[in-house]
Image (tube, grey):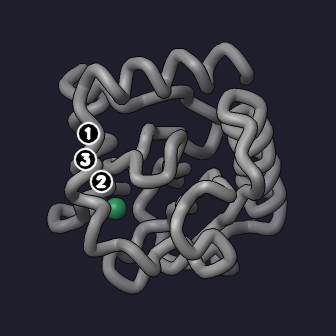
């Protein structure tokens, strides 16, 4: 099931057409992408394959599988980038399609004790290029 006005459904469709270099890995229930910015080095997003708004509305067995996929992705990112801390965020207020932001955090970043969207106004200055996406994807994939 897809949704015509959903940016994540669009991203999944473009990935299947081979138009996006941002895909890292395909899990049974989700896709791991390099994030749109690298303000946090190694920032990735895990996207549920279908257009579903709420984690709690998934069957329990699928909830557990998605969480296991999230943990596998998180371990790989942590091993690849050796951050100070890993942060997760799952909101879906703006894009109502289940996705998890996976943020490696570093002691060197400003306000590293605060939540990861604090400096979101600066994210666009660190937009992920195709070359950056390829490098991050390879590094994470080596650790999966
Ligand atoms: Zn969607």
Screen quadrant of the N terminus: bottom left
Q: Using the rendered view, name the quadrant where residue 29 is placed.
A: top right
Q: Residue 126 in the image: state x and y as whole percent.
A: 28, 49
For mark 2, give the secondary structure.
helix
Determine the residue positioned at 49% across, 52% down. 40
Does label 2 point to a residue whose CB lies under 8 Å from ligand 1?
A: yes
Say if 52 sits above or below 9 in the image.
below
Q: Residue 123 in the image: state x and y as whole percent.
A: 30, 61
Q: Which residue is mark 1?
A: 13
Say if 46 sits above or below 51 in the image.
above
Classify residue 136 as left or right of residue 81.
left
Does label 3 point to a residue whose CB lies under 8 Å from ligand 1?
A: no
Q: Residues within 10 Å of mark 3 (few under 14, many from 20)?
A: some
- In three-dimensional space, the C-alpha distance between marks 2 and 3, rounded to whole angstroms, equals 20 Å
Task: Kindly check if marks 2 and 1 are in contact, taking CB atoms under 8 A apart as contact.
Answer: yes
Q: Which residue is mark 3?
A: 127
For mark 1, give the secondary structure.
helix
Task: Kindly check if marks 2 and 3 are in contact, taking CB atoms under 8 A apart as contact.
Answer: no
Classify residue 65 as left or right of residue 125.
right
Q: Which residue is mark 2?
A: 9
Q: Residues within 10 Å of mark 2 (few under 14, many from 20)?
A: many
Task: Kindly check if marks 1 and 3 are in contact, taking CB atoms under 8 A apart as contact.
Answer: no
- Number of labels in the image equals 3
- Front residue of 91/38: it is 38
Screen quadrant of the C terminus: top right
- In three-dimensional space, the C-alpha distance between marks 2 and 1, rounded to whole angstroms, equals 6 Å
Q: Residues within 10 Å of mark 1 (few under 14, many from 20)?
A: some
- Front residue of 16/82: it is 82
- In three-dimensional space, the C-alpha distance between marks 1 and 3, rounded to whole angstroms, equals 21 Å
Tell me which numbered mark, 1 or 3, is placed earlier along the sequence: 1
């Amino acid at each position: 099931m897809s949704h015509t006005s959903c940016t994540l459904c669009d991203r999944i469709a473009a990935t299947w057409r081979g138009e996006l270099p941002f895909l890292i890995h395909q899990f049974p229930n989700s896709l791991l992408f390099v994030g749109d910015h690298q303000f946090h080095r190694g920032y990735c997003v895990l996207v549920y394959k279908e257009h579903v708004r709420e984690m709690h509305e998934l069957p329990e067995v699928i909830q557990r599988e998605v969480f296991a996929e999230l943990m596998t992705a998180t371990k790989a990112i942590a091993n690849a980038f050796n951050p100070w801390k890993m942060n997760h965020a799952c909101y879906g207020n703006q894009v109502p399609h289940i996705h998890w932001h996976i943020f490696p955090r570093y002691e060197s970043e400003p306000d590293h004790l605060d939540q990861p969207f604090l400096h979101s106004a600066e994210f666009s200055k660190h937009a992920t290029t195709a070359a950056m996406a390829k490098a991050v994807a390879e590094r994470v994939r080596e650790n999966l």
